[in-house]
Image (tube, rainbow, N blue to C red):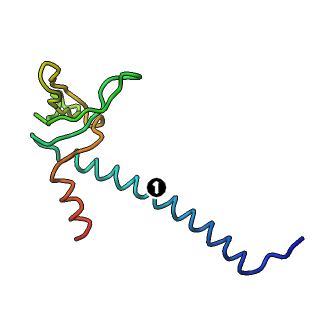
């Protein structure tokens, strides 16, 4: 059985740690993106542009629309809803969605969040 040199052992350790670091960086980026989305959704306002999921199962799709209103549902349940206009012409529609359906917010807030991280 060939003897493994110290350099080979160290290289194997370095390779393992590099793979672990890459996995952690991927996880950190995913968490950061989810947190940024949550912050952006909390600051939604009229005329913001959002992408959101509609439909179920095979008909599920992501569409982009303009926020018409963000409001708390009456009755004190603490539930928020968002009214969004999407589509064009005869297929245009207004949807009432849950903030959890939002997959992306396309507003100036994204630039503000990036600036906050720098400061």
Q: Is residue 48 left or right of residue 105?
A: left
Q: Please, what secondary structure does the residue beneath circle 1 have? A: helix
Q: Is residue 7 left or right of residue 83?
A: right
Nearer the observer, 70 or 79: 70
Residue in the image at 16% along x and 34% along y: 72
Placement of 57 over or under 11, stated as above or below: above
Placement of 63 over or under 30, stated as above or below: above
The image position of residue 29, as x and y in percent, is: 40, 57
Residue farthest to the bottom? 6
Quarter of the image for the C terminus: give it. bottom left
Residue in the image at 16% along x and 31% along y: 84
The image position of residue 17, as x and y in percent, is: 59, 68
Residue farthest to the top? 90
Number of numbered discs overlaid on the protein picture: 1
Q: Is residue 117 left or right of residue 1?
A: left
Residue farthest to the front? 89
Residue in the image at 27% along x and 35% along y: 52
Residue in the image at 22% along x and 64% along y: 116
The image position of residue 54, as x and y in percent, is: 29, 27
- Name the residue tied to disc 1: 27
How packed is label 1: few (under 14 Cα within 10 Å), some, or many (20 or more)? few
Placement of 6 over or under 92, stated as above or below: below
The image position of residue 113, as x and y in percent, is: 22, 59
Residue 86 appears in the figure: yes
Quarter of the image for the N terminus: give it. bottom right
Nearer the observer, 14 or 34: 14
Residue farthest to the right? 1
Residue 78 appears in the figure: no
């Amino acid at each position: 059985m060939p003897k493994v040199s110290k350099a080979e052992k160290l290289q194997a350790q370095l390779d393992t740690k590099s793979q672990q670091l890459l996995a952690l960086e991927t996880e950190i980026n995913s968490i950061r993106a989810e947190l940024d989305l949550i912050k952006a959704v909390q600051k939604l306002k009229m005329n913001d542009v959002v992408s959101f999921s509609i439909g179920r199962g095979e008909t599920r799709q992501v569409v982009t629309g303009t926020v018409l209103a963000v409001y708390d549902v009456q009755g004190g349940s603490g539930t928020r809803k968002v009214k969004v206009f999407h589509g064009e012409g005869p297929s245009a529609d207004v949807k009432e969605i849950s903030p959890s359906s939002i997959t992306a917010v396309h507003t100036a807030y994204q630039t503000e969040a990036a600036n906050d991280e720098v400061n």
